[in-house]
Image (cartoon, rainbow, N blue to C red):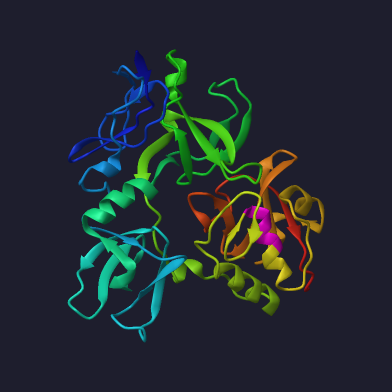
Amino acid sequence: MESKLLKFSLVCMTGALVLAANPKTAYAYEEGVAGFTYDKISNNSENGSSSITTLASYDIPVPGFADIGIADVETNLLVRSGPGEDKKIVGKLPKNGGCDIIEEDNGNGWTKVSSGKVSGYVKTKYLITGTKASKLALKVGDYIATANSNGLRVRKEPSVNAEVIDQVAKGEELIVLEGVVPNYDEEHKKWVKVSLDSDESEEGAIGYVAKEYVDLSYQLKKALSIEELNFGSEVSSVRIRLVSKAKEYLGGRYRWGQNVLGVAVDCSGFTQQIYKKFGYSIPRTSRSQGSSGTRISSSQLKPGDLVFYGNGDHINHVAIFIGNGKIIHASNRRDGIKISNLYYRQPVKFVRYINDR
């Protein structure tokens, strides 16, 4: 009996690596680092089960890391300018976030690391290293499609004739659900199935992007620098405090349908609970939040105002504007609460609840 598997392979210095297995037709993707070709694979077994092994079963280097470390914390691992708790905090590495080890612990309990734009020292006891880190990385990382052109169209179906449900800015990242749409005809081999941030389901809104307009890679979360967390000046104290409070939850867990800060929230649960801390009662869902308050233009945006995303009049995601062209939002199961560019997707509405002229 022939059993069929869905197999993603990522090529690095050691060769092709299996990213996931799933009882579907098998397709291998082997075309250089983060590149892919289409090749059907089948596995014969008497009982129909698969013997294909996942990446985490191998002792191999993780693509993108020379000497990997992973943050073993509940929320964020603080990165400091020097080895000591009295040293300045220069960034935060989220739970299961990846870093390169620059200098190993010399016995003082601190390890020097680099992640994203952040370089500094973390407590060694909160860092997983070596083989254990390599194996864990291949369980907690994600397969990502990065837009390589502006205005990347996300379509409802894998076809150039399908409805455009959103547009994504160059450099923005989408979680890949299927590396290439598993269909036999040549047209469908050109599409990647992705997830958009949305409060409509745990997986987000499902869409398809043309493979030629994205770069595919395997990634771990990275550290954020304190500079990346800054916002503009000349705003009221309540807005500064609201944005600062929201940033305290960076790296927090996303779960659809939840609204408990410090435990798990979805996008509208996050905005509702942050606003609640400052005496503002706003509706529960993104659609309802977008229908209340005062509608404003993009030129009127101030830190603390809400930004809505969706398709036309259909709102499915909400974020808090924090200034300098940035938003903070409970994005998806991979990233949790994060900071993104305002135009990482095309906003459909801006709403103000804080009347502090």
Q: Is residue 86 above or below residue 315?
A: below
Q: Is residue 82 above or below residue 170?
A: below
* 114 on left or right of 197: left
The N terminus lies in quadrant: top left
Main SS, magenta region, reads helix
Residue 141 on image: x %, y %:
38, 48
Residue 127 on image: x %, y %:
31, 66
Q: What residue is shown at x 69% (from left), y 64% (from top)?
A: 273
Residue 305 visible, this orientation:
no
Q: What residue is shown at x 46% (from left), y 24% (from top)?
A: 181
Q: Is residue 270 magenta?
A: yes
* Furthest-bottom residue in this view: 86
Residue 90 visible, this orientation:
yes
Residue 80 on image: x %, y %:
35, 76
* 109, 349: nearer the viewer: 109
* 280 on left or right of 127: right
Q: Which residues, given as a range, are shown in magenta?
A: 266-272
* 134 on left or right of 333: left
Q: Is residue 160 above or below residue 280?
A: above
Specify the quadrant of the image occupied by residue 130: bottom left
Q: What residue is shown at x 36% (from left), y 87% (from top)?
A: 86
The C terminus lies in quadrant: bottom right
